[in-house]
Image (cartoon, grey):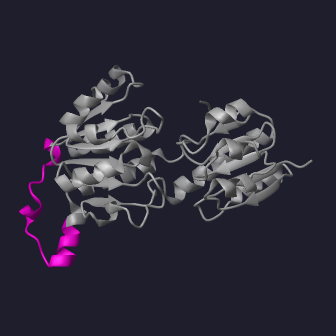
Amino acid sequence: MKAKVVVTDQAFGGTLAERAVAERHDAEFAEFQCATEAETVAAVAGAHVVFVNLAPVTRAVLERMAPGATVIRYGVGYDNVDVRAAGELGISVANVPDYGSETVADHTVALLLSSLRKLSVYDSRIREDGWIKPPGLGTLRGFGDTTVGLIGTGRIGFSVAKRLMPFGFRIIAHDPWAPAGALTAFGIESVELDDLLSRSHAVSLHCPLTPNTHHLIDDAALARMSEGAVLINTSRGGLVDEDALVQALKSGRLSAVGLDVFSQEPLPPESPLRALDQVTLTPHSAFYSAHSVEQLQLLAAEEADRALGGRRLRSPVSA
């Protein structure tokens, strides 16, 4: 019986590397654009290797796969995969943690600098009103007088810090998994979360979405942030309570927000975030560059090659 390789969904425009690894192992290949659980259940029936982007990989989905199957998540996060259920069913799960850290860091810093300088709001006011005086949006803090707080200092968070330092920012960070000495050696002050929220003029999120971090930024967290602070999220939408975020923007607690990820994607047409000009929205594109996408698919295909060849996975994940 031939092995079966399935792509549940992808946003890359092609699957040459995935098709090539299936052909190398004389496996069947099928590609879909699943969005719902029902679509994904139907797509993965009997699959031995499943590449997944954003499709929901629930217990019901996992139960339809071949025994001992492998799920490969395109990217770093894997919160759309029920990893605990996979372990109970004997299904392996892998991610691609190191394909585009630099690209995400570039995007994060672009959002942060633009938000601190209020570029999108200046642009909209000129287009709508004809002109605006420089102080028309309030005081702008110089970069050398600005403290940036990073929540999470993995590959991406650390890359963000490296890009920000030449601008003169003070960098503080909260990461319970990072040795404080390692951060201090690079000029980053390690602090508790409450301290970071109260001291930072801008906060950037770089932590995974877990039950413990869901709505990490909620009403209480936003209330602890500095008046007029900036928030950037290129990590996972579920880290932020979007209802609380909207209220913080309307009240002036936050002056600007840059979001690449959302609790529901695509962002619903009725989302109040769309109507706020202090918010810069990008479509979960922080990972995207020609090089990073190529690397992502090649690394995912290499992981599939290991799975189909009965070899140890490079980047397994577990609950």
- Please give the name of the residue rendered at 28% of the width and 47% of the height, measured from the top-left corner: 231
Give whichever of 240, 204 is nearer the camera: 240
Q: Quadrant of the C terminus?
A: top right
Q: Is residue 127 magenta?
A: yes
Residue 226 x, y percent position in the rendering: 17, 41
Main SS, magenta residues: helix
Q: Quadrant of residue 268?
A: bottom left
Answer left or right for 36 relative to 177. Answer: right
Residue 113 x, y percent position in the rendering: 26, 53
- Please give the name of the residue rendered at 18% of the width and 48% of the height, measured from the top-left corner: 253
Q: Is residue 315 visible?
A: no
Residue 271 drawn above or below residue 103: below
Residue 46 drawn above or below residue 147: below
Answer left or right for 127 relative to 3. Answer: left
Seen from this angle, which residue lies furthest bottom?
130
Residue 28 x, y percent position in the rendering: 83, 55
Residue 178 drawn above or below residue 120: above
Q: Is residue 243 visible?
A: yes
| Segment colored magenta | 122-145
Give whichever of 170, 278 is nearer the camera: 278
Answer left or right for 304 relative to 138. Answer: right
Q: Quadrant of residue 38?
A: bottom right
